Image: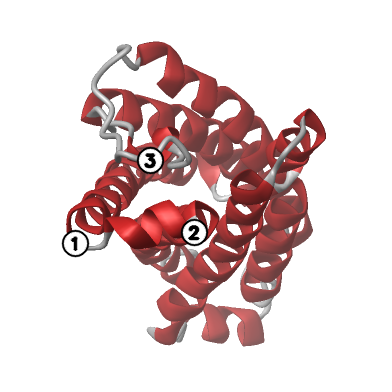
Amino acid sequence: MNNTTATRTADIPRRFIVFWLLSLMIPGVILMLLRGSILGYATSALGYLVAVFAPAPVWLLIGFLQYRLLRPYLRTGLWWLLATFVGGILGMFVGGPAMVLMMPQGEVLVLSSQSTPEWMFAQFPLLPAAFGGAIAAAILGLSQALSLGQGFRRGLLWFCTSVLSGALAAVCGGIAHLAYARTMSELNPAAVEGNPAMQTIIALSIAMAVGMIVYGLLTGLIMRWILVRRT
């Protein structure tokens, strides 16, 4: 690595963490707005199928934004883009079912109207949420660690950070989702009954925003630590 790159690596600004957080949060909220709109207004199996594959372009966007952010510091930035795209999609397809398989056929909070999307008010058991989030993040983290090019120890650190962050993000996002749903059902049930699709969009967006803040802050701090010590 030349002296210019070494200097830039050593002087990585603290706002790097903010940009890292935004590279996750903005695409994540876009995804939930898109998926919430599809789920809220879907009337056919095609709509639900589109919702399943909606994350693909979003993970590509996340990979591209992080590639641009890491490019001054890592020669393997382009591999990071590919690893994030592939790992993110695979993680979602595996982590989601893993969480559902661990969920009991439990309690559901239902409003009086049958038009209310009951899944929106389903309980979020913390252990299944954490397990599903950890599995998804483990696949993503492993893919990214292999592309990081910073040796075994730092790759392992990134993998473990991703797993822990994914578990915490899933739990925090689930709690935020359920808190909003319960609050709306108690304070303004008419809003949910009158426009369940909009409430679905809002609930999913809140859950994603909270989860991405947790995941982005933890992984951003560790990524900056790795890059600073790269020299």
Q: Which residue is mark 3?
A: 113
Task: Estimate how packed mark 3 is, as few (under 14), some (14 to 19) or many (20 or more) residues with alpha carbons within 10 Å.
Answer: few
Where residue 184 appears, as percent x and y from the top left, is 27, 58
Looking at the image, which is closer to me, 229 or 171?
A: 171
Checking the image for residue 187, the label placed there is 1
- Precedes in sequence: disc 2 or disc 3: 3
Q: Earlier in the sequence, mark 3 or mark 1?
A: 3
State the residue at coordinates (42%, 85%): 15
**Disc 2 to disc 3, C-alpha distance:** 11 Å
Q: Is residue 215 left or right of residue 106?
A: right
Secondary element under disc 3, as helix, strand or loop, is loop
Q: Nearer the viewer, mark 3 or mark 1?
A: 3
Quarter of the image containing the N terminus? Answer: bottom right
User: Measured along the vertical axis of the image, is residue 224 above or below residue 186?
Assistant: below
Residue toward you, 145 or 106: 106
| Position of residue 226 measured from the top left corner of the image (x, y, whole percent) | 43, 60
